[in-house]
């Protein structure tokens, strides 16, 4: 099989695009958290949600255009995404804090929170945030 054909075939899979884009956004989020907490000494309870929220626009547009190739109306999808981000911010902060309180590394908490939110976000993005305007379904 031609390598270009294989790459096109893999990229055409919506779950792969979601995980690839999400992975890149996770690295940006983790890097921001590391810079703020480890290098700048910002307390973890502040650095975690700030890093998470700074990746807001990057993640939204990357998931919208690359992962889900959505044509849904912009304003409603931004509002739904914002609600999901608010929920995820609280969940992420709680998980990272809990890991730290248990004596685990904050990085372990961050990885756990990403694993948990990755699963529910896929379904939330597909069926709610980026759902097509007319039929309620995005073709991934």
Image: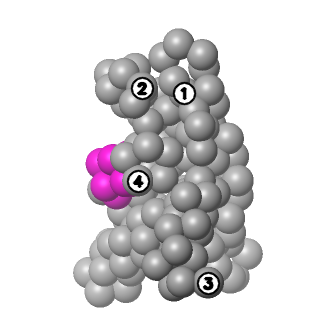
Going by the picture, which residue comes out furthest to the left? 40
Element marked by disc 2: loop
Whichever of callouts 2 and 1 sits on the residue coming sooner in the sequence is 2
The CA span between labels 4 and 1 is: 15 Å
The circle drawn on residue 72 is: 2
Q: Nearer the viewer, residue 65 or 104?
A: 65
Element marked by disc 3: loop
Going by the picture, which residue comes out furthest to the top? 134
CB under 8 Å between callouts 2 and 1? yes
Element marked by disc 4: helix
Q: Is residue 97 left or right of residue 47?
A: right
The circle drawn on residue 43 is: none
Q: Position of residue 107 (x, y in %)?
A: 56, 80
Q: Position of residue 100 (x, y in %)?
A: 62, 74
Residue beneath disc 4: 66
Residue beneath disc 1: 131
Q: Residues within 10 Å of mark 1 (few under 14, many from 20)?
A: many
Whichever of callouts 4 and 1 sits on the residue coming sooner in the sequence is 4
The CA span between labels 2 and 4 is: 14 Å
Q: Residue at the spot x=54%, y=83% of the render?
A: 2
Q: Is residue 37 magenta?
A: no
The CA span between labels 3 and 4 is: 25 Å
Q: Residue at the spot x=60%, y=16% of the render?
A: 135
Find the magenta span and give its range.
55-62
Q: Position of residue 123 (x, y in %)?
A: 67, 41
Q: Residues within 10 Å of mark 4 (few under 14, many from 20)?
A: some
- The mark closer to the camera, 1 or 3, is 3
Q: Nearer the viewer, residue 38 or 82?
A: 82
The CA span between labels 2 and 1 is: 6 Å
Q: Residues within 10 Å of mark 3 (few under 14, many from 20)?
A: few
Residue beneath disc 3: 1
């Amino acid at each position: 099989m031609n390598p270009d054909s294989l790459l096109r075939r893999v990229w055409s899979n919506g779950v792969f695009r979601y995980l690839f884009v999400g992975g890149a956004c996770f690295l940006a989020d983790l890097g921001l958290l590391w810079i703020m907490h480890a290098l700048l000494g910002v307390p973890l309870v502040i650095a975690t949600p700030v890093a998470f929220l700074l990746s807001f626009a990057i993640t939204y547009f990357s998931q919208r255009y690359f992962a889900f190739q959505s044509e849904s109306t912009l304003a409603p999808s931004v509002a739904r995404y914002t609600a999901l981000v608010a929920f995820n911010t609280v969940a992420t902060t709680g998980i990272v804090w809990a890991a730290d309180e248990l004596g685990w590394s904050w990085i372990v908490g961050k990885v756990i929170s990403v694993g948990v939110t990755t699963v529910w976000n896929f379904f939330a993005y597909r069926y709610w945030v980026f759902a097509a305007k007319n039929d309620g379904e995005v073709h991934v």
